[in-house]
């Protein structure tokens, strides 16, 4: 972002987002719980950062030349970020996305001028998975460049170079816990690497939605899905990728969707903060971490930082849709913040230490 606040391209205003302390949850947990407001990016998500860094790095290396077309497979938000960056910098874009994501994401990709290719959702082992489909399309034409957000470490570089330093500066170096979910692994990879270099005592936590395998992988080295499945989009992964390999993770946690819904509704009512589903997952884990770890030595408050990684309006059809939630056997009126806090206070077994050395695989 230009220092004087005057940009000439939409891609130039990516980054330098505000840090917001959530009053209601901070009072309940008696610590500071803050979110990096990544919805302030022009595409409305943290994925704008990765999209920009991947494209700039490819341009610098010569892999992406004027007149070429970018191809990427995505659950949605990276596609939106790439659509903005591609349009701003003069490239075409083809986005391959699995069916079943929110309609809001499909609409935004199309509005920004990218070609949207929808494929059936299927396991990664299936050659028709959106990831493999995007690679095939890119391989078919020498004027196409595959962004490959999972393995392209320019993704994590975006957060090592920018997001991590912003968090450290905005907390005056007093961030004590950092929490985030992992999708491509870029955010957790880059931010935790930077923060651990600044202060090895910062606790780093990866939150995993139900149905993903990161939680079990970080303890055993095996990607075994947890019970059930989450409606949270764009986070959770069942394989080790280069961006996640860069991460420094101390603890892992998995949470049910019902907890996410409780927190999302509570901060909406108390703080006027409308979280997307992945953001609500992050904030719920941050709330648990604040309760779990308590005050620092000498009674000093913990400062827990996470990401509000997307716009809440893109989750209206699921996270804030009573009929949809009830189809998943989640009944909003049955879950209160008091019940959630009591369970978090009484249950010491939700968060696990990372015991598996995944970096050397």
Image: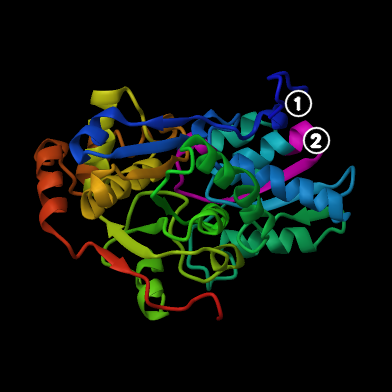
Question: Please, is residue 46 above or below residue 5 in the view?
Answer: below
Q: Are marks 1 and 2 in contact (CB under 8 Å)?
A: yes
Res 113 label: none
Image point 70% across, 25% down: which residue?
Answer: 3
Q: State the residue position of label 2.
A: 89
User: Judging from the image, what secondary structure is the residue with disc 1 in?
Assistant: loop
Q: Earlier in the sequence, mark 1 or mark 2?
A: 1
- Res 223 → quadrant: bottom left
In-image side of 223 versus 145 (left or right): left
User: Judging from the image, what secondary structure is the residue with disc 2 in?
Assistant: helix
Q: Is residue 257 visible?
A: no
Image point 78% across, 46% down: which residue?
Answer: 56
In-image side of 334 versus 241 (left or right): left
The magenta stretch spans which residues? 86-105
Considering every residue shown, the one lying at the far front of the view is 298
In three-dimensional space, the C-alpha distance between marks 1 and 2, rounded to whole angstroms, equals 8 Å
Seen from the viewer's position, the closer of residues 224 and 200 is 200
Q: State the residue position of label 1.
A: 9
Seen from the viewer's position, the closer of residues 201 and 56 is 201
Seen from the viewer's position, the closer of residues 301 and 36 is 301
Q: Is residue 286 visible?
A: yes
Question: Please, is residue 4 above or below residue 274 in the view?
Answer: above
Q: Position of residue 118 (x, y in %)?
A: 58, 49
Q: Residues within 10 Å of mark 1 (few under 14, many from 20)?
A: few
Q: Is residue 104 rendered magenta in the image?
A: yes
Q: Residues within 10 Å of mark 2 (few under 14, many from 20)?
A: some
In-image side of 121 versus 74 (left or right): left
Q: Position of residue 260 (x, y in %)?
A: 27, 45
């Amino acid at each position: 972002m230009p220092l004087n606040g005057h940009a000439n391209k939409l891609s130039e205003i990516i980054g330098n987002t505000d840090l917001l302390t959530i009053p209601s949850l901070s009072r309940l947990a008696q610590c500071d719980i803050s979110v990096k407001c990544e919805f302030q990016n022009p595409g409305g998500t943290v994925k704008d950062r990765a999209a920009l860094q991947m494209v700039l790095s490819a341009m610098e290396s010569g892999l992406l030349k004027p007149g070429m077309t970018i191809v990427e497979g995505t659950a949605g938000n990276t596609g939106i970020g790439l659509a903005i960056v591609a349009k701003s910098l003069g490239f075409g874009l083809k986005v391959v996305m699995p069916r079943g994501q929110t309609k809001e994401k499909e609409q935004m990709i199309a509005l920004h001028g990218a070609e949207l290719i929808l494929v059936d959702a299927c396991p990664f082992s299936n050659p028709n998975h959106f990831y493999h489909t995007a690679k095939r399309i890119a391989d078919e034409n020498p004027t196409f460049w595959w962004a490959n957000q999972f393995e392209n470490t320019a993704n994590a570089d975006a957060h090592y170079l920018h997001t991590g330093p912003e968090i450290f500066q905005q907390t005056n170096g007093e961030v004590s816990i950092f929490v985030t979910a992992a999708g491509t692994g870029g955010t957790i990879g880059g931010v935790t690497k930077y923060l651990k270099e600044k202060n090895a005592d910062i606790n780093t936590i990866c939150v995993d939605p139900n149905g993903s395998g990161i939680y079990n992988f970080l303890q055993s080295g095996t990607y075994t899905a947890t019970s059930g499945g989450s409606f949270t989009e764009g986070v959770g992964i069942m394989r080790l990728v280069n961006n996640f390999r860069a991460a420094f993770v101390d603890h892992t946690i998995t949470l049910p969707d019902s907890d996410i819904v409780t927190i999302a509704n509570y901060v909406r009512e108390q703080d006027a903060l409308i979280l997307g589903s992945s953001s609500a997952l992050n904030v719920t884990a941050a709330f648990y971490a604040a309760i779990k770890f308590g005050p620092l030595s000498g009674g000093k408050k913990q400062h827990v930082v996470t990401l509000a990684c997307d716009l809440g309006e893109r989750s209206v059809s699921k996270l804030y849709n009573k009929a949809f939630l009830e189809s998943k056997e989640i009944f909003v009126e049955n879950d209160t913040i008091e019940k959630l806090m009591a369970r978090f206070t009484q249950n010491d077994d939700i968060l696990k230490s990372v015991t598996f050395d995944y970096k050397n695989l």
